[in-house]
Image: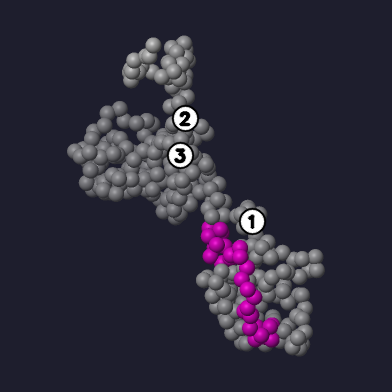
Amino acid sequence: MTSGPKDPQQPSGKAKGGVARAEGLSSERRSEIARQAAEARWHGDTPKATHEGVLKIGEIEIPCAVLEDGRRVLTQSGVMRALGRARQAKGRQHYDGDVNLPAFLTAKNLKPFISKDLEVTSSQIEFRLKGKKAYGYEADLLPKVCEVFLEAEQAGVLVPSQEHIGQKAMILIRGLARVGIAALIDEATGYQEVRDRQALQAILEKYLTDEWAKWTKTFPDEFYKELFRLKKLPYPSLGNKRPQYVGHWTNNIVYSRLAPGVKAALQKKNPRLRSGERARKHHQFLTRDFGHPELRDHLQKVIFLMKACETWEDFEPMLDRAATKYGDTMPLRLEASVES
């Protein structure tokens, strides 16, 4: 006996099993499963704070963080306290217009001082802080809010309940006048170390390549002739190998002064062999479009200075003034970015 066509409204075998299992769960268990699913979605959609700290401006302290996408944020509660507000206003006196502004900016008397840019950038940010839900504002919002209250105060339109916010705004704006708020947050959270690594990596990517180039003569003989003259040493005759200590001089005069981290990165890419020599020339690892032109330009300047000097004692201080030396070693916190 053949069965009739399957009713599309009836669940399949697997679906029936799922329905049966769901019906067998307690309401508490079903609620827990739903909560876990919602939490998983929230974790996937909500940016996480990778660095956190406390921003100190005079006697005012504002919790702050840097999110995984690089945004610097101030916590909502911290901004409220910094402006002299213990909590969000119970009732919002919105001015006309569909805008997304914090409660402390929606009073009608402030409307003339709020720019379109502020309306756009003042949205509240939801993020994860130590696994918990947190709310904040992008760091640039704070000085903009202070400017609104200071302009309103200057125009004489602040009401008595807003005057203390105007006073706080003056304190904050003075504290922020000397240094950018992003730099303050980076220092408070420790993010400046990441920022420094990223900046160094960008420099090294411009100067260095992992693929060494075919050797070509890059250092002119004139450079070495002037170097030996200043050191009061006889210049090696044609075909004679230059002493190994010439490499130390070259590191000091050239590679230590090209850019931060370049010399240390080259030493890692081109280490010494057991013989004490290196498999390649350092300049073979410089990028053709940026590293090599910078090297040639530096060498021309160095040779010009050498010719203007009679002794090494004359030359060295002139070189230090003309080209910054970035040190013999790279800071430990930056080494990881060179190796990666």
- Residue 202 among magenta residues: yes
Q: Disc 2 or 1, which lies upstream in sequence?
A: 2
Other residues around mark 1 within 10 Å, as few (<14) / some (14–19) / many (≥20): few
Q: CA distance from mark 2 to mark 1?
A: 35 Å
The quadrant of the picture occupied by the N terminus is top left
Residue 284: x %, y % from top left: 63, 71
Is 77 on the left-hand or right-hand side of 273? left
Other residues around mark 2 within 10 Å, as few (<14) / some (14–19) / many (≥20): few
What residue does disc 3 label? Answer: 47
What residue does disc 1 label? Answer: 339
Rendered position, 311 above or below 99: below
- Residue 308 among magenta residues: no
Per the rendered image, the range of residues in magenta is 199-227
Q: Disc 1 or 3, which lies upstream in sequence?
A: 3
Pick the front one: 311 or 31: 31
Residue 312: x %, y % from top left: 69, 81
Label 3 sits on a secondary structure element that is loop
Amino acid tagged 1: Glu
